[in-house]
Amino acid sequence: MSRIAVIGAGAWGTAISIVLGRKGTHSVHLWAHEPAVRDSITRRRVNELFLPGHAIPERVTATSDLAEATRSADIVVSVMPSHHCRRVFQALAPHVSSQALFVSATKGLENDTLQTMTAVITGVLSSGRGFQPRIGALSGPSFALEVARGDPTAIAIASADVELAERVQHDFSDPAFRVYTNEDMIGVELGGALKNIVAIAAGICDGLGLGHNSIAALITRGLAEITRLAVACGGRRETMAGLAGLGDLVLTCTGGLSRNRSVGVELGHGRKLSDIVAGMHGMVAEGVLTTNAAMGLAQKLGVEMPITGQMHAILHEGKSPREAIHELMTRPATSEVGLFRVGKA
């Protein structure tokens, strides 16, 4: 039996807790920032704010105390919006064991430092506690609602620490949740973060009334620029053809449950970003902030990312979505040969 702390009780953190709790062999402590979420889970065994209608197993204990959540934890799973990761880990650092395994399940980048979540966590724990954490990244095509209701799902755990990856694979897998191992942590994290930007673009296409041809082209060219940046950062091309790359990209660009795609749809309809975000009631579309970090990385490494650039202009510079799509389609024509070559678009 493992004692597992899940830090973050949004939809995805709650769904992971349901997966772990339904195995019946783990002690799961779910940390909720919102007292109302903690009370809802404790009293009614459901997260009424972020994942209503899905029963949470009795083996899952909700708490708003970081020390209680992480005390003696064998595995600490980080499932929080990217912009909260550093602050939360600074608060929980005094309470975690240097022997614990750490798993990041957040699909985003830190806006100011351009770091992945595993880099943020490693930096906080190494500077605050003086140890290098054993860490991995969990990512792949996985809508929280479908995971919670038990739809067959496949996901990847990536780490250079093979023993950690195999432990997470064993502890998290069940007949409805299949976990594959991968050694390319950078590629898995960037695939999970960057696909959200392309999903916003896919939603814009839908909001503008464009058809399947447009979405297929966008997914293909989006995968190309994600791959270029991932490889420039040290990731592997083959990872982008897997669950955390193509798999998650297709899901997020086409699935109606995608928050990032939904933001794009509303932008395509002409709504302002501030109004869209205000209406999300605490839900987070990671792609909005990730676009800033992706542009920073691309400029730093000299990687051309035309879709990301146009999404940045729409989200943060007030550019017309229709004008952005027009500019993408009227860029100078090139050969598809070398589609995934670093620096070429």
Image: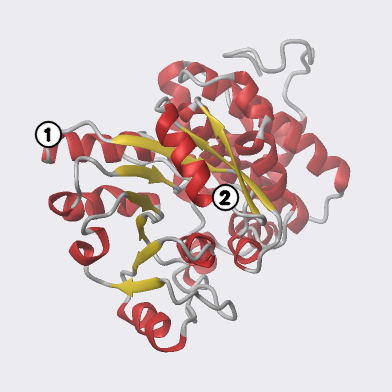
Identity, as a three-letter code, of the amino acid under mark 1: Gly
Mark 2 packing: few (<14 Cα in 10 Å), some, or many (20+)?
A: some
User: Residue placed at 67% from the left, 52% from the top?
Assistant: 153
Q: Which residue is mark 1?
A: 130
Q: Given contact means CB atoms under 8 Å apart, are the residues at marks 1 and 2 in contact?
A: no
Mark 1 packing: few (<14 Cα in 10 Å), some, or many (20+)?
A: few
Is residue 113 in view? no
User: Residue placed at 35% from the left, 73% from the top?
Assistant: 61
Q: Point out the tag, 1 or 2, that comes first from the N-terminus.
A: 1
Q: Position of residue 192 (x, y in %)?
A: 54, 40
Judged left or right of residue 78, residue 131 is: left
> Quadrant where the N terminus lies?
bottom left
Does 88 appear above or below 107? below
Q: Position of residue 234 (x, y in %)?
A: 47, 18
Q: Position of residue 218 (x, y in %)?
A: 74, 37
Is residue 123 in view? yes
Q: Nearer the viewer, residue 51 or 217?
A: 51
Q: Position of residue 151 (x, y in %)?
A: 70, 61
Q: Nearer the viewer, residue 320 or 41?
A: 41
User: Residue placed at 49% from the left, 74% from the top?
Assistant: 57
User: Residue placed at 72% from the left, 41% from the top?
Assistant: 325
Judged left or right of residue 296, residue 88 is: left
Q: CA distance from mark 1 to mark 2?
A: 32 Å
Q: Which residue is mark 2?
A: 173
| Tag 1 secondary structure | loop
> Quadrant where the C terminus lies?
top right
